[in-house]
Amino acid sequence: MDHQSLFNGRETPVALVLRLHLPIQNTALICRAFTHRSYINEHPDALEDNERLEFLGDAVLDFIVGAWLYQRYPEMLEGDLTRMRSALVQSEQLADFARKVGIGGAIRMGKGEAAAGGRDRDSLLCDTFEALIGALYLDAGLEKVSEFIDPFLKEAADRLLVSHRLDDSKSLFQEWAQGQGLGSPNYITRSASGPDHSKVFEVDVVVGGSIYGSGTGASKQAAAKAAAHDALVKLGIIPGD
């Protein structure tokens, strides 16, 4: 199966699992993995959303990705392994994996959530991808999860290394601030504007009462990273874009 090709369209959760050749036999488990809580609100006959499976999938991914990195990069230092794992399991990256295989088209969600653009929202795609991993683990085990996720990890890890995105701005800025004896940075949300499905956050990074950088993003996490990046550029620690 080619994980690199994008799939566009609507299909049932079972059809998606069959298309991806995933060995999940439990149909109820498949449906649960793709059920957003908004669907439960509109369909009383639906018994459970995917939040528990999401929790499980998150833990499974942390282990699988950590073990994969340990084996693939035997010379990489512990700190770099940690930053690489964080980059590979962050919401934006998992949402990208979900888009590659068309998970958005199979999510069972309420009409309001769908109308608000939920099928292409990073957080919702990430959560559903994690829930699918949880279902795959329960029905087929760690080895099958590894087989499924391996092509995603190879492509993403290579891209991260080539583009130097392994260096996390927040971690680098914290190392600088603590090295200067200034303590840990605080990230303060200055504003949040726009509708719920398309908010823009503005965040300042503050150390010792002084603002060192500011950033914007579609999530508080993204805005905080942008603020840390801005601080590093202003301090001359990294070059500007």
Image (cartoon, rainbow, N blue to C red):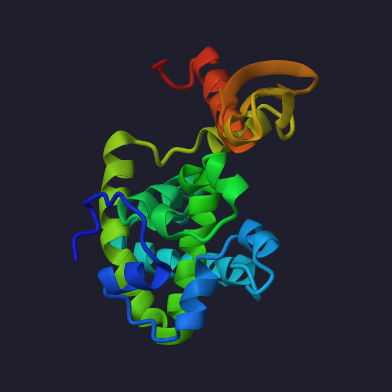
The x, y position of residue 57, in whole percent, is 52, 69
The x, y position of residue 203, in whole percent, is 67, 24
Quarter of the image with the N terminus in it: bottom left
Q: Total label count? A: 0
Q: Would residue 178 be visible to someone looking at this image?
A: yes
Q: Quadrant of residue 47?
A: bottom right
Q: Quadrant of residue 25?
A: bottom left
Name which residue lies at 57% across and 39% down. 116
Residue 241 versus residue 235: which sits nearer the camera?
241
Name which residue lies at 55% across and 69% down. 59
**Residue 15 against residue 5 in the figure, above or below:** below
**Residue 147 against residue 117 in the figure, above or below:** below
The x, y position of residue 105, in whole percent, is 40, 54
Name which residue lies at 57% across and 71% down. 53
Q: Is residue 22 left or right of residue 126?
A: left
The x, y position of residue 96, in whole percent, is 38, 47
Name which residue lies at 58% across and 31% down. 198
Q: Would residue 176 be visible to someone looking at this image?
A: no
Q: Residue furthest left?
A: 2
Q: Residue furthest right?
A: 209
**Residue 126 against residue 211 in the figure, above or below:** below
Quarter of the image with the C terminus in it: top left
